[in-house]
């Protein structure tokens, strides 16, 4: 009896189904509108899902490696002391990272050694007696560890254990000492690997050979694929001007790899864009609060058995190379999903139209339509 | 004849369409339930798609540049030798990267030069005769290239070509020599550019001027926008304690830029969060396997025409500054898409409800409803 | 009267609704097909949305920190001068970054000092008289600042202010001097924190203890979780060969953290993959245009009160460690959304089937079906 009940229910489930009664309507205006809306939806689905969103393709982002190399020599003549600055001297760090600094100006403090000496003659370091210099207290922005003594002949300041003499960075050379940095060139080598497709690309694309590289300089219109950039051009393309950014600033270089691998992979080429990040004084509020980009750097040496150092306060332009990559290729799974969702949207819209039309046809169907079932 | 057939088919396609027969039902309870469900779906679509998911906006991520600067001076007094450590001495690398290390402890080996000397008196380097030191074999963890000789007076070890004398790093100073690092401050300058909207922001937002920066220290509740962080606070906010992380560890600083550019861009402000990555011994398994964060670093110099170096094994805290950015702004294309998908969902749900209701109305429609067509 | 109109409209809105007339059809073949299609759609929704796309889970990406440490000692014997290279000498930068270079070959130029000297005897620097060397012009690829003099005994070249003597990098040692780099080992420590779930993981997972680390070497099949990699293996796994990449190249190491946190978090383990980025000459076009990976590096020292430097042109392998992370965990919001969209798709397809079937049933319904309303 129970078995019979289940069999019955199953056969009901499989052999019966409900379907809405349809009315076949013959109406010129409504029919045309209905078909046009359907065509519009179809066009939208194909246009949007397939052509604009490329719903038939899967995507992958790249494993990327950036290597940079500066070329060019700077020359300074400070108080008759001729000096030349090559890439080893003006690029930090030295190993060709994707983020690096090119020195454009500096304050040099030679021959510092560990010892005791008076602080700078700035208001906050001034003192009248030893009691003004509490021993051991280290001012957050001071140069050393206070000994507790107040020293000096005319202007007395607290004595500190520090790298002596302490650096005085009040006079920043203006114009920047290494304005010639404008003519340095930057070579960018960028390799991208799309693991999902096993495709490996370099920004030295087809046609960018040794001969071309030796003579080319990047230009957004005439040489958009030359991987050699003049620093002055970079600054200008980012919307800044060299004289002010030489006091310290940052520029972002974006390498955009948007590749459609359904075409030949030689079509997959990089696009360079440049963004001034900070450094020009017309950025009103920022400029007021922060004084450009600078850091300190020391070269250590031994002299007369004592450790000494040459301290450089380096002002420079920081370059951040950012790789943005997305490759697309035909794939069966997203295609099916896109078709499915397209059919879904089409179905919904069609039914919605019919739903609305059935309201309109209330008044007309009884005259022109006829029942089918 | 064929032309007539095609014309016929076309006119059929355009002028005829099918629409389901509708039943207009008048039923209090079912009607109310039906409308309430529709209103619920509408509320869900508006609430979810538009308010929660912000479907009417396009998004962009930023090109970002981070520049850091440490301030503060450390002081050590080892065996009466006073020494001061400034940012040039304790920050690696020097140029203010977004990822850097602050030295908190060190083991110094002075005056190493290239030559031949015995290995450390550790079990694995011990030997009885020359045959125990096979020439040329370089132990993976050894300090040099074995010469093949077994040397030494009491405890014999293999001789190596190496930077001599070899470093002995068994005794790690405890507590860390530079515990004063707790009072160093970190200044973070972060510029973000959203290329799609041409919006440039800095973490030095409106109101963060030179005056404020000179005196403020970051505090999550009272000064959440001050870009100056006390190292001790950073460590504490990341859930670690300074005394243990001083042996070596890593902290992640996340700068979150989630901006709604439909408001004024001065509303676009960074939020800082801190994540202890490794370094505290209560991370049971990890601590057992790895001994914190340390690396070696050498200062080279010439003495008596010979190259020498001072080797430092540096223990420190590594800071990784990670910028997460997303800006949103009204855009017509996602708005249309969102409306489309909203209408789609609404349509599906409405039809589904009607479908279900038509089951319910089987029993009622014949009594209360009436046919429309 | 108006109030009555509104009340009427409202009661109409709430108490009346339209529902399509249903036809209950009893047809074996059509019924079975209809149900099978519905089951298929249901299976697709559950399989795709829930199992494949994991639509019931929310996702988070990690805050990650990578720390690297090289071990191993290189040995060179050039012209009888024995020298050993430890990690301090061959890794750039020294602090254990996620992107670093291991030196495999070098050209050394000792004792450079600032001064005046002739350029290299290359065609582009040759001159006959002073007029060939226009004063002050700095050739982009030259070594210094031209003084305007043409000097030399037999082969005359322009004189430059530069680090003298200028580097001659024409003879690249072949085979690479530090081929022993093949036996160096790389230790990678990678911590990831998923902030949304408060989960912290390290690549030193459960079972990777101090004992294991001391002896293990990574192998994709036998030791896939050992965090110690032999350089030779890395190069081979990335599809390159050591002898050619030693001239300069780049390898990407991807650490993939794809974690399902609905399982125990000890199941969340890293997977390492290796991608040769550039460096082997069978990459046809690239190899022609760029000469591997190299950079220059100087060690400064003082000799006889004069600043001197030892310049190294370093050829090496660059390693870029890239962490890709995504963690998933059950979350009520995406679950509801997935169910909603699943119901939506199911509804659409069901209605579409019925729509199609109503066409088929034109011919059959009138015989077997019966009207319900």
Image (cartoon, coloured by chain):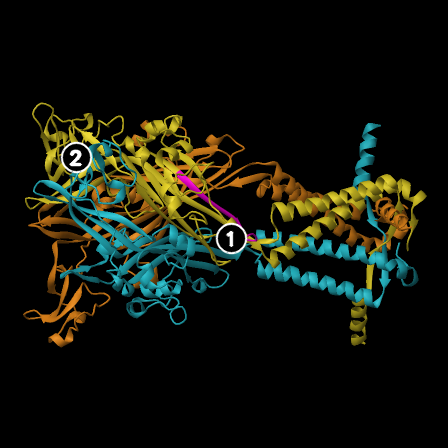
Chain colours: A yellow, B orange, C cyan
Q: Which residue is mark 2?
A: A109
What is the secondary structure assignment of the residue under circle 1? helix
Number of numbered discs on residues? 2
What is the secondary structure assignment of the residue under circle 2? strand
Determine which of the numbered discs, if any, sits on residue C22 in the image: none
Q: Nearer the viewer, residue C147 or C59?
A: C147
Looking at the picture, how far across and down is residue B282, in whole percent?
33, 58
Per the image, is B226 magenta? no
Q: Image quarter for residue C182?
A: bottom left
Q: Are marks 2 and 1 in contact (CB under 8 Å)?
A: no
Q: Image quarter for residue A340?
A: bottom right
Q: Is residue B209 visible?
A: no
Q: Is residue B318 left or right of residue B351?
A: left
Looking at the picture, how far across and down is residue C368, in whole percent?
90, 63
**Distance in Å between CA atoms under marks 2 and 1:** 53 Å
- Name the chain under label 2: A
Q: Residues within 10 Å of mark 1 (few under 14, many from 20)?
A: few
Q: Give me the residue at 32% from left, 67% from top.
A: C209
Per the image, is A258 magenta? yes
A308 lies above or below C223: above
Looking at the picture, how far across and down is residue B317, in whole percent?
28, 50
Q: Give me the residue at 28% from left, 32% from top.
A: A180
Q: Earlier in the sequence, mark 2 or mark 1?
A: 2
Magenta part, dominant SS: strand
Magenta part of the chain: A252-263
- Foreground mark, 2 or 1, reads 1
Q: Are marks 2 and 1 on the same chain?
A: yes
Q: Image quarter for residue C118?
A: top left
Q: Is residue A269 left or right of residue B292?
A: right
Q: Residues within 10 Å of mark 2 (few under 14, many from 20)?
A: some
Q: Is residue B121 visible?
A: yes
Q: Which residue is mark 1?
A: A265
């Amino acid at each position: 009896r129970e078995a019979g009940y289940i069999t019955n229910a199953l056969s009901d489930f499989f052999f019966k189904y409900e379907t809405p009664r349809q009315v076949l309507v013959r109406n010129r205006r409504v029919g045309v509108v209905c078909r046009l809306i359907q065509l519009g939806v179809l066009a939208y689905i194909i246009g949007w899902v397939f052509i604009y969103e490329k719903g038939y393709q899967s995507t992958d982002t790249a494993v990327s490696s950036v290597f940079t190399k500066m070329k060019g020599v700077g020359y300074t003549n400070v108080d008759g002391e001729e000096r030349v600055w090559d890439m080893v001297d003006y690029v930090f760090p030295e190993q060709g990272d994707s983020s690096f600094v090119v020195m454009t100006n500096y304050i040099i403090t030679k021959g510092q050694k560990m010892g005791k000496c008076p602080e700078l003659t700035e208001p906050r370091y001034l003192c009248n007696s030893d009691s003004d210099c509490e021993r051991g207290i280290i001012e957050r922005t001071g140069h050393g560890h206070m000994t507790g003594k107040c020293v000096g002949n005319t202007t007395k300041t607290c004595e500190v254990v520090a790298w002596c003499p302490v650096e005085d960075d009040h006079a920043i050379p203006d114009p920047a000492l290494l304005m010639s940095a404008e003519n340095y060139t930057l070579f960018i080598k960028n390799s991208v690997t799309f693991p999902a497709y096993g495709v490996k690309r370099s920004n030295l694309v087809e046609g960018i050979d040794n001969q071309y590289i030796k003579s080319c300089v990047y230009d957004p219109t005439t040489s958009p694929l030359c991987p050699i950039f003049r620093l002055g051009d970079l600054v200008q393309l980012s919307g800044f001007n060299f004289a002010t950014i030489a006091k310290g600033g940052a520029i972002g270089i974006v390498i955009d790899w948007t590749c459609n691998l359904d075409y030949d992979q030689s079509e997959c080429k990089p696009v360079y864009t440049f963004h001034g990040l900070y450094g020009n004084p017309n950025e009103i509020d920022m400029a007021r609060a922060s004084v450009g980009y600078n850091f300190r750097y020391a070269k250590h040496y031994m002299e007369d058995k004592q450790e000494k150092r040459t301290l450089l306060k380096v002002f420079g332009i920081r370059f951040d190379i950012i790789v943005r990559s997305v490759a697309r290729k035909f794939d069966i799974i997203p295609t099916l999903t896109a078709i499915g969702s397209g059919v879904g949207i089409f179905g919904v819209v069609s039914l919605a139209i019919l739903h609305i039309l059935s309201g309109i046809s209330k008044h007309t169907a009884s005259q022109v339509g006829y029942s089918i079932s």
